Image (tube, rainbow, N blue to C red):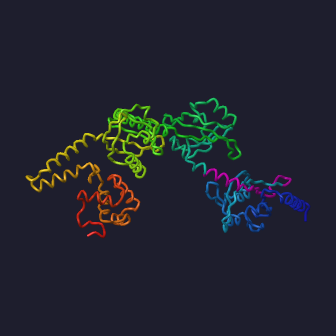
Amino acid sequence: MSQDVLTTETNRRQLQQIIAGLSDGVILLELDQSILWANEAALRMHGVNRVGDLGRNAREYAERFHLRYRNNHPLTPEQYPISRVAAGEAFSDVLVEVTPRDDERTWVHSVRSMVLTDRDGEPESLVLIMSDVTDWANAEQRFEKTFNANPAPAVICRLSDLRYLKVNSGFLEMTGYSRDQVIGASTYELDVLEQAERRDLAIERLRNGATIPQMQAQLRLPDGSSKQVIVAGQTLQLNDEDCMLFSFVDMELRHKAEIALRQSEERFAKAFRLTPVPILVCSAEEQRVIDVNQAFLDTLAYAGEEVIGKTVAQLEFIDDQGERTRLLAALEKTGRVDRVDVRVRRKDAGVLECAVSADTVSIHDELCYLLVLMDITERKRTELELVAAIEEVMKDASWFSRTLIEKLANVKNVNSPQLPSVSFTDLTARERDVLGLICEGLADKEIAARLKLAPNTVRNHVATVYSKLDVHSRSEAIVWARERGLFSSERRPKGQR
């Protein structure tokens, strides 16, 4: 054996001893592309135990391992790093994903090549050096997915040259820019801090790589217009480079919502103030008066400071405590009441007959009750006078026909002050159906089955019927209907003949 061969073999053994303990993977190849040797790190990065498991040469290696770039594009066998170094090509920092053909595990390798030459400068051995960057790649992939999925508009610029490296769909949708218009552009071309309220501070923080606090700014759009935003900057490292993450809040939608809300509140305030009908707004929790309109103060002869801040109970403007309690209980239960007759006492002790309608409203995120009072004193007086006149006429009705007597009696009963002012036509069609089935003696579940409604819906209808009729039980509702001759005789409650 010649001295050159001995020297070569000795050098190789020494080289193998040196690199065997390295954390980087190393694969040695002959000039004919056969795999000569690999250290433990290289074997571990491929999920194998022996050099032979890598394949005898570059061709067998390509048959046993599937390689693709990070963008999921597969490599052809000629593009494999092992084939490129076998062809004598020098390269560095090639990122590839490596997956065994018969395994689901995947590693990410950062690969570079080296050609070892003899004393004459001729190629003698080929070296493939790889680092396992799987953990780094997985972390970067998680960040990439999180960044792209974040609905908040955001861009990332590199601090060394202030050029944008990444942009998410939220920013593109908010501004109308395309990805190509943003990636690679500088902060001078696309100034996200334009007209920022504290621009000098923001620029200083950007130069020093420090956090930029939230501030308003104008973002220039591709069509030449601008959008008002809130921008903030947070430093981070991306691919071992110092970067700044800019995130944004679109103020346009908030601004429009604020304008719409303000206009709605102005319309409500105008209608509230100018309506000639007395209106009171109180909190739902304590029934404490929040506001009243001028018609309320004029009708009940109060001054504003005597009303605001008091509870409905403290004001005692609803003359009968029982009526007040029932009204508020019905309002709490159903959220609304419609034309409930009550006696309203003025500050000067005068009494008015009123029909109260109320509903639940939300004012500044607080649930409130809005009570509307309709003065029906004159109507009531007319009804009583009519009833009195009918009673006077009927004292001597011998010369009236029977038909006329029955009609007068019906008029008297309908206008009787003892009956609630609500009529059958005040009920909705569905509420009439429910009342009719109540009169048949059906329970809530049976009504739900008959009308093909949910039990909760039926319960809500029943509660509304009770509230409108001012009754508190099924029997009272049935009596209410019978007194008015509603529903035919065959629709009797169960058990009645």
Residue 241 appears left or right of 465: right
Count of all numbered marks drawn on residues in the image: 0
- Magenta stretch, residue numbers: 118-145
Tell me where residue 233 sits by quadrant: top right
Q: Residue furthest top?
A: 200
Quadrant, the N terminus: bottom right
Judge whether residue 125 is colored magenta.
yes
Residue 356: percent from left, percent from top: 34, 44
Judge whether residue 384 is colored magenta.
no
Tell me where residue 22 sits by quadrant: bottom right
Residue 210: percent from left, percent from top: 68, 37
Quadrant, the C terminus: bottom left
Residue sitting at 41 percent across and 48 percent down?
Answer: 325
Most foreground residue, 151 or 476? 476
Q: Residue furthest front?
A: 395
Residue 268: percent from left, percent from top: 39, 37
Residue 128: percent from left, percent from top: 76, 57
Residue 42 lies, with reference to residue 350, above or below; the image says below
Residue 5 appears left or right of 229: right
Most foreground residue, 385 or 78? 385
Residue 209 appears left or right of 440: right
